[in-house]
Image (cartoon, rainbow, N blue to C red):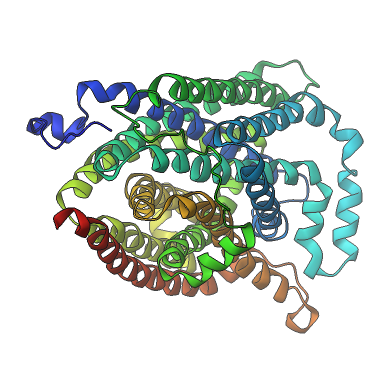
Amino acid sequence: MSNTDTMPEFGKIRGFLFPIYGFEVKKALPMGLMFFFILFNYTCLRNMKDAMVVTAPNSGAEVLPFLKSLLVMPGAVLFTLLYAKGSDIMDTEKLFYVTIGFFITFFGIFGFVIYPNLHILHPAAATVARWQEHCSKFMYWPLAMLGNWTFALFYMMAELWGSATLSLLFWQFANQTCKTSEAKRFYAFFGLLAQFSLLLAGEVADYFSNISRNVPKGDDPWAISLRWLMGIVVVSGIVIMAIYRWIYKYVLTDKRFYDKPELPGVKKKKQQMGFWQSMVFMVTSPYVFMIAALIICYGIGVNVIEGLWKGQVKLLHSNANAFNAFMGRYSFYTGIASMCVMIIGGNILRRFSWFTAAVITPTLTLVAGSLFFSFIIWRNSFVDILAKIGTNPVAAAVSIGFVILILAKSTKYALFDLTKEMAYIPLDDEMKVKGKVVVEVIGGRLGKASGAWLQSGLLSLFGLRIFGGQKVGLMDIAPYLFGILITICLVWIFAVAALNRKITAATATATKPSET
């Protein structure tokens, strides 16, 4: 790879906004665009999955933790097994196409085949309501998930798109093809460019949710919006594969950018570590385990805030189109905030320590999340004050959560993701592939699933007869969720400090031979 150590320093403005040399644009821009379209699809899918599930008949935000724990987590385990097997029989390039192709095929079928036939595939809403009425409240929300099973399947696939394509495929590829000196400059640029996708996804969601207002009476407005959105997701997936192919053909064959004797993922003659060996190594390796700990803590911390907030959003936006349009605006403003934080975050990475950049996200989540839960728990104390300014506790909770989650997500995209990916670089090639599969897909899903298990466990527990046997919502367990948030954020900060020590030691070991 080209050595940039002797290249001239960037000017202050160039170094702040675009720390990439002219000849490096050939590599940085297409990779950034690939990141852009992957995140664009993920944002669109994330908004749609929440809109469908939360506003479905007999459903609500309370069903989200059950989906994540009972469906998404097993799906992630199955995907990991299949992906690990695929990595043994296919090279990286073919595996990328197969994975992306599988996802976009499903989303295309859902929008144009499955959704138009819901009347055949789903039990009647009245039937599900009778199930919920006559069964123990312990099963109230799982029955809602069962009654809308195709939405649950879509939710799982949308969640796995984020883990499989963003956390795994893209970052694995970037870590295989970028050296540390490039990562410090490229990764912030990738993230900054990708944040424009949140703006575009937000506008797309808002536009296609609103055009359905003029549909003929009797037609399903959401069906029209969904067809447009699924078509866009499929086209975007095809563009991702085209960019990936271009990089393989024109960038990785350029010795300035990639000077290894073989392309990434080309099968070697040596025996590779098996999947279960990789799992054991992840658990027994303190370095890799700490990376997993960061992902798990983030998943739990944000999950307990987000679920409660989406329940409040449903009270204001009760149908799928309105909910999706609102989430589109949320994505748009998240993109703006992320770009601002990304510029600052990229400079934090270059000017300060890894620890400084990595500890900002858990600290902000702890402080901002505490403010949100404090308002939720003691909201009745603010009724009179809110009435004087023309609002109410529900609208105020939505607005406060809106701001807090935007701050949490923007620091996640700008700092958490970048510092996490940099932590992989000192690992050997074997662990960058299979170790990352386990950590990103299983660890990422385990974080969200752990938050979901805690929430669904509490909802089910208080639904038992010995605790009254009543239907329980997320608002009822808010104090317990607050305690979980504080605990997990403190563990998260400790894990950042522990991983920082290991990165420092690994980097020192890696550079020692060149100094002798």
428 vs 5, left or right, is right
Identify which residue, 268 or 501, lies in the foreground: 268
Q: Position of residue 333 (x, y in %)?
A: 39, 36
The quadrant holding residue 30 is top left
Identify which residue, 368 or 85, lies in the foreground: 85
Q: Position of residue 491 (x, y in %)?
A: 40, 73
- Say above or below: 348 vs 264: below
Q: Residue furthest front?
A: 269
- Say above or below: 235 vs 470: above
Q: Position of residue 462 (x, y in %)?
A: 70, 75
Residue at x 81%, y 26% (from the top left corner): 113
454 vs 217, left or right, is left
Identify which residue, 424 or 51, lies in the foreground: 424
89 vs 169, left or right, is right
**Quadrant that contains the N terminus:** top left
Q: Residue furthest bottom?
A: 466
Confirm whether residue 144 shows in the render.
yes
**Quadrant that contains the C terminus:** bottom left
Residue at x 64%, y 67% (from the top left corner): 453
The quadrant holding residue 18 is top left
Confirm whether residue 392 shows in the render.
no
Residue at x 22%, y 62% (from the top left corner): 508
The quadrant holding residue 23 is top left
Identify which residue, 286 or 136, lies in the foreground: 286
- How many numbered marks appear? 0
250 vs 256, left or right, is right
Q: Position of residue 513 (x, y in %)?
A: 21, 57
- Say above or below: 398 vs 28: below
